[in-house]
Amino acid sequence: MLGSLSPLEVTGLIVSLIGLVPVLTQYRDETKLFTAGYVLLVVGMVATNLETFALEPVLNMVEHAIGIGAAGVVFLAAAYVRRESVVKG
């Protein structure tokens, strides 16, 4: 069963989980949207690896809708908010 896991997807999960440590420890109120976006990417990576074991259609939707789609929207909002704060000074 573990042999069916993709080495690339497992590596992506490990890297994203390691990256979660500095993202969460460096959390500030002004970085909350960037933190939320990164957490959504990690959710997508977890779903990617879990779909090998069960609920493939559901977890595949979670991976793409939340892990990619929602994360992209949140990163877009974070960039917009940051740009507005820089422009306004």
Image (tube, rainbow, N blue to C red):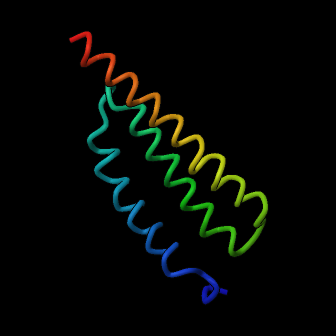
Going by the picture, which residue comes out furthest to the left?
A: 89
Q: Residue furthest bottom?
A: 3
Total count of labels: 0
Decide: is 13 above or below 41. below
**Residue lying furthest top in this view?**
88
- What residue sits 32% from the left and 25% below the top? 30
Q: Quadrant of the N terminus?
A: bottom right
Q: Where is residue 59 in the image (x, y as percent from the top left)?
A: 71, 59
Q: Along the horizontal axis of the image, is 8 left or right of 52?
A: left
Q: Position of residue 87 (x, y in %)?
A: 26, 15
State left or right for residue 58 relative to residue 29: right
Q: In which quarter of the image is the C terminus?
A: top left
The part of the image, by quadrant, that contains residue 85 is top left
Residue at coordinates 34% horizontally, 57% vertically from top-left? 19
Above or below for 35 versus 79: below
| Residue 16 at x, y percent in the picture | 41, 60
The structure residue drawn at horizontal position 40% and vertical position 24%, both measured from the top left corner, is 80
Residue 21: where, in percent of width, then height?
Answer: 33, 53
Query: Is 39 located above or below residue 12 in the figure?
Result: above
Residue at x 42% of width, y 69% of height: 14
Say above or below: 49 vs 64.
below
